[in-house]
Amino acid sequence: MQGDVLFSTMGTTIKTAKTRENQYGVDFTYQYEFAKVAAENGVSAYVLVSSMGASSKSSVFYSRIKGGLEDAVSTLNFRKLIIFRPSILDGNRQEKRAGEKFGLIISRFITSFILKNHRPTPVDVLAGKMIRMSLDQTVGFRMIEGAEIFSV
């Protein structure tokens, strides 16, 4: 595997994965192993989509997986590491997610006047910001959260 930038956007839900072990495999193991091989082969930049609230010390399983992945990839030898922590992602999905759809409706309403950092993140806005940040020549670590994802 060779290249300049690795974009990592993989993720699943417990409903789709069926077990915590399967979800961990998708949300941590596959992404970490791919990132490790990329770093070993000289890929200089890694751009990861994580999640708002990610922390390896979280009591929430999903947040703990995402935080653990952030911690793990930060030890790899990338010249540039950019981690995005969006709120709930807003975009077309092939599968039906009733809970997520309800959450988006509530989020859009609440965040229109308060909690602006928690507003749903349109996937096209996130993708555009990821590309722009990957093209920036700045090296080192950046964490992009909330409203900063929406800034130009």
Image (cartoon, grey):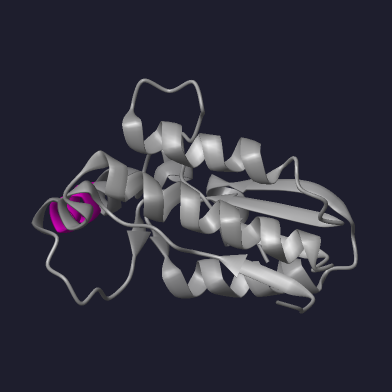
Residues 99 and 67: in front is 67
* Quarter placement of the C terminus: bottom right
Task: Look at the picture and state if 147 lies above or below 43.
Answer: above
Query: How far across and down, in percent of the image, does residue 114 sit?
Result: 38, 38
The image shows residue 68, relative to residue 33, as above or below, that is: above
138 left or right of 7 in image: right
- Nearest the camera: 19 or 137? 19
| Vertical side of 127 occupied by 12: above or below | above
Q: How many marks?
A: 0
Residue visible at 48% across and 43% down in the picture: 117
Quarter of the image for the N terminus: give it. bottom right
Q: Give the range drawn in magenta.
A: 100-106
Which secondary structure is most common in the magenta stretch?
helix
- Residue 108 rendering spot, x and y as whole percentages: 28, 53
In the image, taking residue 72 as reference, residue 117 lies left or right, namely left
Q: Is residue 120 in view from this perspective?
A: yes
Q: What residue do we see at 84% from left, 67% from top?
A: 42
Residue 86 in view in this figure = no
Q: Write the residue at 19% across / 58% down.
A: 16
- Residue at position x 43%, y 70% from top? 123
Question: Where does the image place residue 9, in percent across and percent down from the top left?
Answer: 49, 64
Considering depth in this image, is 47 or 71 the residue closer to the camera? 71
Question: Does the stretch in magenta take in 72?
Answer: no
Question: Residue 12 lies in what quarter of the image?
Answer: bottom left
Rendered location of residue 119, percent (x, y): 39, 50
